[in-house]
Amino acid sequence: MFEGYTLAELGSIFAMQGFAGLILFSVFVLMALGLAIIFGQMGVINMAHGEFMILGAYITYFTSNFFLNYLPALFSVYFFVAMILAFVGAGALGMLVEWGMIRHLYRRPLDTLLATWGLSLMLQQFYRSVFGAREVGVELPQWLIGSLPVTDVIEVPINGLFVMALTLLITVAVAVLMYRSRWGKQVRAVMQNRVMAGAVGIDTEKVDRYTFGIGCGIAGVAGSAFTMVGSTGPTSGQLYIVDTFLVVVFGGAQSLLGTIASAFVISQAQSTMEFFLSGSMAKVLTLLAVVGILMLRPQGLFVLKVRR
Amino acid sequence: MRSGNIFLKRNEVVFVVILSALLLVVFPMALDSFRLNLVGKYLTYAFVALGLVLCWGNAGILSLGQGIFFGLGGYGMAMFLKLEASSPEHTAIQSTPGIPDFMDWNQITELPAFWLPFHSLTLTIVAILVVPAVFAWIIGVAMFKRRVGGVYFAIITQAIAAILTILIVGQQGYTGGINGITDLRTLKGWDIRTDFAKEVLYFVNVALLLGCLLLAQFVRRSKYGRILVAIRDKEDRVRFSGYDVSNFKIFIFCFASVLAAIGGAMFTLQVGFMSPSFVGIVPSIEMVIYCAVGGRLSLFGAVYGTLFVNYAKTIFSESFPELWLFAMGALFIGVVMAFPNGLAGLWQAYAQPWFDRIGQRGAPRPISPAPISPTAAPAERRT
Amino acid sequence: MSSDNHQNGLPSALRRKLLMGMAALPAAALLPKAAFAQAPATSAVNTTGLAVTDTTVRVGILHSVTGTMAISETGSVQAEKLAISQINEMGGVLGRKIEFIQEDGASDWPNFAEKAKKLLVNDKAAAVFGCWTSASRKAVLPVFEQYNGMLYYPTFYEGLEQSKNVIYTGQEATQQILSGIDWVVKEKKAKSFYLLGSDYIWPRTSNKIARKHIEKNSLKVVGEEYFPLGHTQFNSVINKIKLTKPDVIYAIIVGGSNVAFYKQMKAAGIDLSKQTLVTISVTEDEILGIGGENIAGAYACMKYFQSLDNPNNKDFVAAFKKMWGENIVIGDVTQAAYLGPWLWKLTVEKAGSFDIDKVAAASPGIEFGKAPEGYVRIHENHHLWSKTRVGKAKLDGQYEVIYETADLMEPDPFPKGYQ
C-alpha cells in the first residue's frame, strides 16, 4: 500500500499515526484512571463507570448551553467550568452511591458487579427519560476546533492536544494524591489492610467514600473531555466499559503505573493494527492479545507486592 | 454436614415433584400457546443459571461469559437448521443455490468447511456438547492452572464474550453477522414453527431441564461437589490437603458450559433463530442475574429466578415500555443488597422453618438445599 | 426506467389538488354524524378475526424506546403516532378509529420477535408499524409470515428481501445509492472513492452495490473499511484517507460512531467544503448529536430532507412540531414511518377490507400524493417508487436540497449485476 509515495509523505503519515495512537492512549488513560482507583484500590467492580462518564458529558452539554444563552461572552472558557462541574457532579453522585450501596458490599466484590449493573440500567433510563433518547451534540469554543498545520501533510488536532494535556494533568494530580499526600497514604493503607488501618485510627468509612467519589469524579471529567471526540447519549457509556476494565486489569489492577503502561501498549497496538487491517479485526486481535497475555501473566504487567 | 451420598433428600424430592408439576402440568394447562412458548424460551436460560449455581454458588467461579457457551450451542443448532432450510430447491433464486442466504449475499459461493459437519444431526448434537466443553477446557486450563480466579476470571471471560461477538458480527459471510441466523424452518422435515411443534419442544425442553437439574444435583451431592465448596471457602487448605484444585474447577466450568450450550440449542429450536445478541456482555450478565435472583446456592432457585426475572421483564415492558429499566435495575440492586441468597434464601429463612415445624415432628431439621446456612454471605475471596 | 413514469417533474397544482382530494375524500364522506351508518359492517371487512369492532381498529407500534436504538427509533414512533392521530381526526379507516398498542423492542432482536408475536397473536393487530434495524426486521419477518400480519417498515435498508407481509416504506439500497454516485461522478468529477461503514449487513451490502457501480463506470475504489458498531476511534482510518487522497469519501457509519467520526475528521483538518464526502446514513436526527458545525459541507443521499420545499412537507413539518415540540428535527426515516399508517389506510379503503390477504393484494399501485416527500406509489414488490435527493449539510443541522432525480426511482431489491 505504500507504492507511489515519497519518503517524506510516508514519514508524515507515520508521524500522524503515532499521534493518533497518543490520542487513543490519552483517552484510555482518562477512562481507566477513575476505574484504577475504584477497582484497583478499592476492589469494587463498578459496571456503572461508563454512566458516570456520561453524566460528566451531559453536565458539559448543559454548561455549554447555559453559557451560550446567558454568558455568551465567556463561552470560550466554559469548558473549564464544565469540567469542574462534571467532577463535582459525578463525584457527588459517586459518594451518594457509595453511601447507599457500595459500603454494604465491600466484603462481596462480585456482588458489587451485579448491583452496579443494576445501577447502570437505572442511570441509562434516567438519562433517557430526562435528557431524551436522542444524542446531544456539544458545541466547542472556537479555539478548540481545528488543527495546527505542522507541515503540508501533518496536522495536529487541537482538541487532541487538549485531551493529552488534560490527561497529563489529571494523571499527575492522581499520582501526587495517591503517593505524596496524607490522604493517599490512608487510601493505600485501607486497601492493603482494612482492619489494621482502622486500628491505627484511620476513618476507613470516610476514606472509602472519598476514594469512590474521586474515582467517579475523574470519570466525570473523562466524560466531559470525551464530548470533544465522541458521542453523548444515554447508552454511550456502555461502549467504554470493557476496554476500560481490560486496561486496568492488563496493567495490574493495583498499580497506577501499570494502568498507564497498559493503556499505552493497548492503544499503540490497536492504532497500528487499525492502519493495516480493518477496524473490526484490529479490535479482535488487540483484545485477543490482551487476553492471551493475561492468561500467561494473570497478575497483569505490574504487580504490587503485598503481604496478606 | 451429613455424610454419605444421599442424592436427594426427602424435601428435595418434594421440590422436584412441585417443579415438574408446575412446568409439565400447570403451565401447559393455564397458558395459551404464545405464553407457553415464552416460558419455554425463559427456561432455556435456566440451563445457564443451573450451570452458574454450580460454578459460582458452589465453586466460587463467576463467569461473565456464559453467553459464549449459550451462543455456541445455539449457533450449532442454528447451523444445522439453516442448512436444512437452504436446500437447493428453497434457495433457487440465489446465485449459488444450496447455501444459506446470507452467504449468497456476501459473495460466498461454496459452503465453508466448518459448516460441513452440520449437515448431520448426529454430528450437530455432538458438536453442541463437545465444542463448548473444549472451549471451556481451554479457558479453564489457561486460567485455573495459573490460579486466576475471582474478579480477574470474571473480567477475562467477559472480554472473551466481547471478542466472540465482534468476530461473529465481523465475519458475516460465515456467521450471518449481526442479524444472526434467521428463518429456520424444519428439523428433519418436521416444521418447528407450528403451535403443536412448539408445545412438543416445550415438553422436550422441560424434560431436558429436569434431567440436567437432577444431574447437577448429583454432582453437588457427590464428594466432588463438597470439595468444590471447600475450594470456594478455603482454596489453599484444599490444595495443601493434596487435591489438584484447578482440575476440579476446570471440570465444573466445562460442565456449566455444556449445560449452557444445551440451553442455547433448545433456544434456537423454540425461538427459530440465533443472533450474536445472546453471546455478548449484556446477555451474559443478565444470565448471572437470573441466577442471583433465584439464589446462587440453589438449583431450584435458579429455575424459579430465571422464570421470575423474565416474567417480570415481559410484564414490566408491556405495561411501562419506557420505564421498565428502572424496575429491573431496582430489582437487581434490591436482590444483591437485601437478599444475597435470592428467592431461595427467602424460602429458607421464612417458609422452610414453618414447613418443617408442621411437616416433621422430632426429625432433625434438614438444612437444604444449600449446604451452608442461609444467613451467611457467600464467601468470595478478594484476590 | 419502466413505463409508468408519467408523474414526473413537479406536480402541477391541479394534480396536487386531485391527489389531496383522493386522500381526503373517503374521510370527508365518513366524517358527518352518520359515520357509523355508512361504515361497512364489521363482518364484511374483517373475516379473519382481527381486532376490528364497529367503531375501532387496533394496530401495533413496535420500536425500541429503550436501549441503544432508542436514539434512532424515537422519531419513527413520533411520526407514526402523528399519522394515526391525523387519520383519526379525518374519521379513521373505513369509519373506524385507529387504536394503537405500543410495544418496546428494547434494541433486542429476539424481543422484537416476541413482541411481534404478541401483537399478532394476542392483540390481533390489523397492521404493525415498526422495526428499524435490519436485524430486528429479519427477526420478526418469520413471525409476520407465519401468523399472516402486515408490517410497515420505515428504514432505508439493504434490499435482498421481499415479502407479502411487509411494505417497505424506506428506500432499498439501489434507489439510494446509484443515482447518488452518478450525481457525484457528474458534478464533482470524482474518480476515486474511499468506502467506509459500520460492520453489519446494511453498510456492507450498500458498499458492495456502490463498489460495483463505481467499477462499472471504470472508476476506482481506493479503500474499504468497516468498524464495529459503537466504535469511537477513527484517527487511523483518517490517516489512511489522507494517504490515499480519494476524491470522495463514501461513509455509511451508523449511530454513535458517527459523532466520533465527524468530530475527528474535523479535528484532523479534513475540511468538508474541500473534501467531498457522501453519506447515506446521516439524517437530520444524527446531526443533532454530531453538531452541524462538524458536518457542514457533507452530502447526504436519501429521499427526504426536512427542508424539502413543497406544501405537503410544510404541513407535515408544522403538524410534527405542533405535536412534538418546536425544536424537533425530522429525518428520512421519520418521514418514511409517517407514510406507513397513511399507506395502510389507503390500501384498506381500496381493498374495502382489513383482511391481511386483501390488503397485501391491494397494495401494489397504491398512490399517496400527500406524502411529505411528494408523490409515492407502492410497487409490485411492496417497496415504494420514490425520488432520490442529494442534500448538502448546513451549519444549522439542516440539509439544503441541491439535486433530485427527475424520475421516481424504481425499487429493485434484487438488483441484477450488483449481487
Image (tube, rainbow, N blue to C red):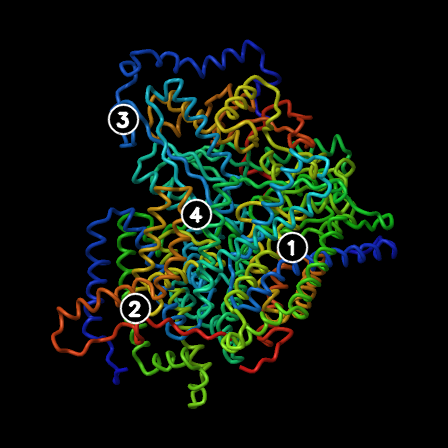
Q: Tell me what residue is drawn at x 61 percent, y 53 percent.
A: A87
Please rate how many residues cluster around mark 1, counting C-alpha atoms within 10 Å: few if below 14, some from 14 to 19, many from 20.
many
Describe the element under mark 2 as helix, strand or loop.
helix
Q: What kind of residue is marked 2?
A: Leu
Task: Identify the mark nearer the N-term, 2 or 4.
Answer: 4
Confirm whether circles 1 and 3 share one chain: no
Q: CA distance from mark 2 to mark 4?
A: 42 Å
Query: Which label number is shown at residue C53?
Result: 3
Q: What's the mark number on residue B213?
A: 2
Marks 4 & 1 on one chain: no
From the image, tell me which residue sits under label 1.
A279
- Location of residue C150 with respect to A97 vertically, above or below: above
**Helix, strand or loop under label 3:** loop
Q: Nearer the viewer, residue C257 or C242?
A: C257
Residue on which disc 4 sits: B89
Mark 1–mark 2 distance (CA, rounded to whole Å): 43 Å
C232 up-or-down from C213: above or below: below
Residue B121: % across, % down: 38, 63
CA gap, disc 3 and disc 2: 48 Å
